[in-house]
Image: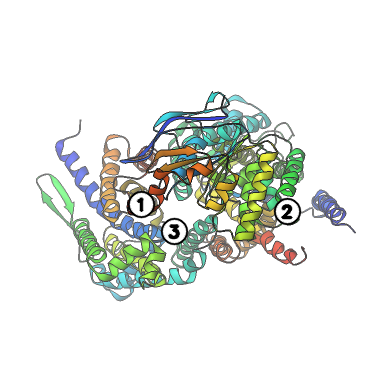
Amino acid sequence: MALLEVKNLTKDFGGLRANDQINLKVEEGEIVGLIGPNGAGKTTLFNCIAGFYPPSAGEVWFKGENITALPANLICQRGIARTFQLVRVFKDMTVLDNVMVAAFNRTNKASSAQKKALEVLDFCGLVTKKNMLAGGLTIADKKRLEFAKALATAPSLLMLDEAMAGLNQTETAEAVELIKKVRASGITIFLVEHVMEVVMPISHRVVVLNYGRKIAEDIPEKIIQNEEVIKAYLGEKYHAARRRY
Amino acid sequence: MKKNTYQWFLLAAGVAVLMVYPLVLKLPFPRHLMIMIFLYATLGLAWNMIGGYAGQISLGHAVYFGTGAYTSTLLLMKLGVSPWAGMLVGGLLSIGLAFLIGYPCFKLAGHYFAIATIAIGEIAQHWMLNWDWAGAAVGLTLPILPESLINLQFHTTKLPYYYIALAIFALTILVTYAIDRSKLGYYFKAIKGDLEAARSLGINVARYKFYALALSAFFTSICGSFYAQYVLFIDPDSVFPLMLSIIPCLIATLGGVGTVWGPVIGAYILIPISEFTRIHFGGGGKGTDLIIYGFLIMIISIYQPFGVIGLTKRFRKKEQP
Amino acid sequence: MFSSEIILQTIISGLLMGCIYALVAVGLCLIWGLMEIVNFAHGEMLMLGMFTAFWMFTLYHIDPLLSLPLCLLLLFLIGVATYFIIIKKILKAPFLAQILATFGLGIFLRYLAQFLWTPDFRMIKNPLLSGRIGLGGIFIGIPELTASAITVLSFVFLYWFINKTEIGTALLATSEDREAAALMGINSDRMFALGWGIGAACLGVAGALMSNFYYIFPEVGFPFALIAYVAVALGGFGSIPGSFIAGIIIGLVESLAGLFIAPAFKYSFVFVIYLLVVFIRPQGLWGRY
């Protein structure tokens, strides 16, 4: 049984169909990448799975339970954590307090939450900054904090929404290492990314969306050669031009 | 001396001073002043739970104060119930009210929520002005009972009132302290910081907003009941007015919202100023101290929205690594 | 039950009063829509408009109709001053500070007025606009009628100004997207100040008009401000015509509620409308969001 199963998921915003009958599975222990041109519906899919808003049709199944249209807080308690594209840290709270909020997802005691928070901060390399106000961090550190918060909720599935955006090369390499460490600790990862150098090397499988539909799903090596994918990113003319030569 | 030891010493000293204060200053006015400080500090601490920690700006809190005052008074007058029981019933009633008000209002964001609380406060005051069974505009004069602890009335001296008020004040500080360190406090602050992020971390936002409001309403209500027993007269204009909703908010903001000691500091600054201006500029109704309030609110919001504690944090930041 | 004359009379009074509510609401809506700051001192600024007209009449024997331009100008300046002295400094402040800043201003102005001019109710006796006209069994006060006419004219002018002039378009642009407008060379600082000026000027006009037939006292403004909040919510955030029409609707509803339900509760009824609107249709009737 797959950890996460999305069945025929459709999401309409008024007249716009942002997700159209999407089917996909994420198996436990995998890293699955979700790519596609801007506006393909990747974040919308994430939001539907995470309970940000309910899908218009279709179902989401997690660990054998139908979690479609559950509110976001219950989905987090079930074991799905997500990060936001534009980081949402609690800027007037310290780094440690930020992560403690997340850690309270699994405990009612402040001492346990603090212990867990410190562990996660150490894992993410933020422990030296634990008393800094989150609002004063650099972008890279804010993203790391966002990551730490999601981790501290002790999820089974971690969904990352463009976690690499805005990072330089060193920061990106560090982030990739962090993702690998997380997966090694037993958490399944589902990530949306634009940075191909990140997605392709680490993903076991890649799913491609375009105009709200899933147009391809395969291992990374095959995806980059996939005609439909190339057409989606680079357009018909390029595709035609390629074929001629 | 380590920082913690220093803080404990300060706290113990403070408690000692407050305990002997009325025994040293035996005149009614200094005692009254301190009772007012305790009362408003408690109101500020109570408001702080929903407004400072959870970030939901309620400007209609007087409705809980009034509920407490009227419940204990009516129970006393119509059924002879002891004000202590009346205080508890009032508190529970206020929690119920918090649920009724919160359930629909928490769906509103920001300004709309604040305006809704103002609207509810105005409606409540208006209804009380027209409710004859509860005294309407004339108000209720509490029956003079023999002075005793059970009756919560004392006529010859303010001393017992002082210690009761101090006890209520201390209890509210303890509860705030407990909130601050616990899951409740962290969740409240998360809700204030970023609602959607809080939700995505597993927080049932509606439920925790209600917890904050319920706690806040309960302690506000207790103050209302105490006030009724202290002044022995209540009417809609004294226990339901808008200003009574604003002052706790101002006190908490002046001292520092979302902290344990902020409202306490705020009360210790504001209430003496208020009482002294009332004496010095006297007549013309309750005008002049409110001019100062208005001015102070503006100054704090513009220059130091994090209050006195915000100021001290700025100085302390230089010491941190 | 009630005669058709009484009902008609109630409707007409409601509509006329509603026009005043409408103009007050439009001023609030302009500021709120422009920069998402609610002017909690709105009622007190209206009160200042009324007192200006009152003192012009009492001290210098200038009729409110003639001092209307002065009230407009004075309130315009007060609005601009409020922006530069207070609002500009809290644009990036925490939400609590934004609410409290204008709230504090309101309290300050209200009790300063009470201190300077006592809480007594004042009236302007025998202004130019006085008396009433009778149509059938219905009596319409001339000051109220003129006030409505002028408020409607003001609204039409405002609507033209915002939608058809260059400055008005700049205002609209700033309210939609401050940064994009800045890229077009629009100075958002000046736009905000202008917005506050115009918003307050509406109160100057409304105040001068009301001084012809309404009691003038320091606390007079607060109920009008509350009704304005309801009107802006009902009309829809950001919609100026929406606020205007909503104001008139509220005047009507309030009047009829006073007749059919109970005069003491008509005020509460208006708030019930507010609560219903924000729960059932939060974007209001014509709102942007």
Identify the residue under disc 2: A130
Query: Which residue bears the numbered disc 1?
Result: A235
Residues under numbered marks 3 and 1 in contact, where contact means CB atoms less than 8 Å apart: no
Colour pattern: rainbow
Query: How far apart are the alpha carbons under marks 3 and 2?
Result: 35 Å
Residue for point 22% across, 48% down: C15
The answer to which of B318 and B49 lies nearer the viewer is: B318
- Give the numbered dot on residue A82: none
Q: Chain of mark 3?
A: C
Please, what secondary structure does the residue beneath circle 1 have? helix
Where residue B72 sits in the image (x, y, percent)? 61, 33
Task: State the residue in front, C252 or A3.
Answer: A3
Q: Quadrant of the N terminus of chain B?
A: bottom right
Q: Residue at x 70, y 53 (%)?
A: B264
Q: Are marks 2 and 1 on the same chain?
A: yes
Residue of label 3: C37
Chain of residue at mark 2: A
